[in-house]
Amino acid sequence: MDSIQSMDRELIQELSRIGIDEAEQVISLAAITHVRPFLSQSLDIKDAELASLLEALREAIPPEASAAAVLPAIRSFALGALEPTSAIAAEIDNAKVELAPSPVELANLPSNVNHVAQMPPIRNQGGRGTCVAFAMTAVHEFHRKMAGTAQDFSEQFLYYETKLIDGHPNDCGTWQIRAAQVLAGKGECRELVWSYNPAGACNQNGEPANARTDGASFKLPTIVLGPKDVNAIKFALAGGATVGFSIPVYDSWYHSAYTRQTGRINMRVGSEPQVGGHAMCFVGYQDDSSAPGGGFFILRNSWDLSWGYQCIYGAGYGTIPYAYISSDGWEAVTATPAKHLPVSDEKTPWAFGGAISTGFRSGGEAGAPSSIVPDPSTSHEGDQVPDILGVLHTIAIPPKIIARINVDPRLPPFDVQWYWTGHAPEYVMLSANHKGYIIYNEHGRNDQSSVIQFTNGTLKPTFDFGGDVRGGAFICKCSINWHRTTDGATGTTPEGEQQFGILGDNPAKATIRGLLPDVQLQVICYKESRFRQFDNVSLPLFGPPAGFGAMQLDTPSPSARQLWDWRQNVAGGVSLYSSKKTEVNQHFKNVYTAYPHAPKLSAEQVRLALYQFYNGGFYWEWDDVAKSWKKYGNFAYADDSMRIEQMVNAGTPPADWN
């Protein structure tokens, strides 16, 4: 609109204040008859002046854009988020975690975060008021995918179970805080167990008999955030999580053809009334000084691909100004990130690489979600990694047990700091019982380290697994033996448990190649893994039926260390290659002995045989009837390997070689 000479600058500023910066937005909004008076109110102009403004805007934009702007929005999009009652609002306020980044952390937040590429396909809630279940299922599915265990969960299950406990059975809508309790307590069954029907009634009864059993395997600890706390939401997104949220809905965007097309939600216009509530999922953000509040969140909707069908982030997605949330946010619920804090990089050489992520399992109150916040007792400068403080609820006595892991790039050993807080002064700690182990059980594995268990007088235990470099879930537990001075009673708190995901970081490709003594081994590693030990969610790279890591070791089955220590995986591949080379050479010696007249294969032909044998199979077979060597079985792997070898030797390796 800045290019329209006749446009009053003050009007442009006022429109920008409510998130409107394109002529099509104004035209589309004014086309909603009952919203038009609120637009005049917001701009402080009379209707005749608004009509003149609209005429100028129509003349300034292409006819096709103007026509699209006044197309009626199809009102087929269901809502379903309830405005928090005073009791629910108090519950949210009591449960919320003050996830406020420190000034240093806030200054170091990236200017943009975008998780769209990691999200599952856009879903469609249809005409049912089930948006809360869709928003929280998006949070759950993103969490599982980033943990390397992607699942398609049942929005129907989550909605049905939430309605059982929300106290409003006659309303289609519900609250996210209730859905969060279901996820933490009952979990969420998979879509294949109870599928969602977008054309069904408000509620779809008849829960399958195995739904709760299946859901119990997929629980998700959740974190309630301040619903208007923009910085906390950004901090959660930057930390590797998504955030379910709910807001009041206004017709200025709900009925807007422009919003339906682009997914861009504007601020409330004037004093227009709310027409309902809706829940969606934050999947990113973008700082932008021209947007209300200094930026906007990227959101995922559950209105199929017909909403936001031309959104710059993809069909089904949209944006909403920070200021909309800071003024009108109802709820915001997230989960602990599956991958959170990097602790090793190329500047800190360590064979394992790695990252620490945080996940919580409550040691106490049923239905009380555990929580995660930055530790307020420490400050961080520059690239320092902040500690993570987790609250673990207990039920036996008033105190809470709080756990923190001190992130150190020289892991292991692991240093864990537990705190005993909030207890009455008559409670005295006698000693603490500690237990820690590492476990990984993906893709048929069942790797568990030795269990380190001891009792001592400190709440800062060290778990040293020695040279046993492995990843997965580091699980540490603590209970406190206490004495009450008022009556001499003694006891032990329930065991608090905290789980930290130990993830891997890939070294530079050249670093892996440096451990491979010849081009043939480098080609094999390229073919097997593209010189990667870990996949895109930092878990050991898996290739069916049973291959792991850079060299895709499968037979014999790799050790736990070979799954996580890329040096050991590469060494295992070199050893396997050497043994297979010996087998191939012996095989051809046996053929030459049995058929003395068989011509010797060239060095290149032997390498073809070795490539194929590493992958599992033979390349050459002697045909004594035809008196010639013939290709045998599936030889595509070897042929492609030889092609790559020739490219490397010619100095023109594949584009993703480096």
Image (spheres, rainbow, N blue to C red):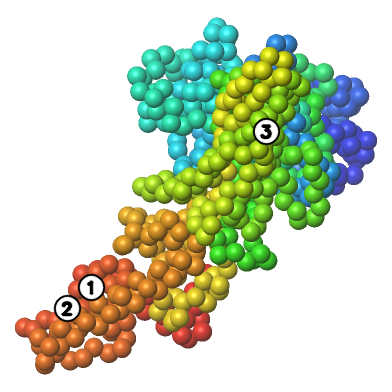
Instruction: Tell which tag, 1 or 3, sits nearer the viewer.
Output: 3
| Relative side of 555 to 598, left or right | right
Q: Residue 92: x, y in percent?
A: 70, 20
Whether residue 79 is visible: no
Direction front: furthest residue: 488
Q: Residue 271: x, y in percent?
A: 82, 18
Specify which label sits upstream in the sequence, 2 or 3. 3
Look at 31% across and 68% down and name the residue there.
Answer: 615
| Relative side of 150 to 631, left or right | right
Residue under circle 3? 402
* 549, 290: nearer the viewer: 549
Q: Residue 229: x, y in percent?
A: 77, 31
Q: Is residue 291 above or below residue 607?
A: above
How far apart in space, not on screen, are marks 1 and 3 (Cα)?
58 Å
SS of the residue at dot 1? loop
Specify which label sits upstream in the sequence, 1 or 3. 3
| Amino acid identity at mark 3 | Ile
Look at 32% across and 82% down and name the residue there.
Answer: 607
Residue under circle 1? 618
How far apart in space, not on screen, are marks 1 and 2 (Cα)?
8 Å
Direction top: furthest residue: 170
Look at 62% across and 21% down and name the residue there.
Answer: 490
Q: Residue 299: x, y in percent?
A: 65, 36
Label 1 close to label 2 by CB (< 8 Å): yes
Residue under circle 2? 621
Label 2 close to label 3 by CB (< 8 Å): no
Name which quarter of the figure residue 506 lies in: bottom right
| Relative side of 582 to 250, left or right | left
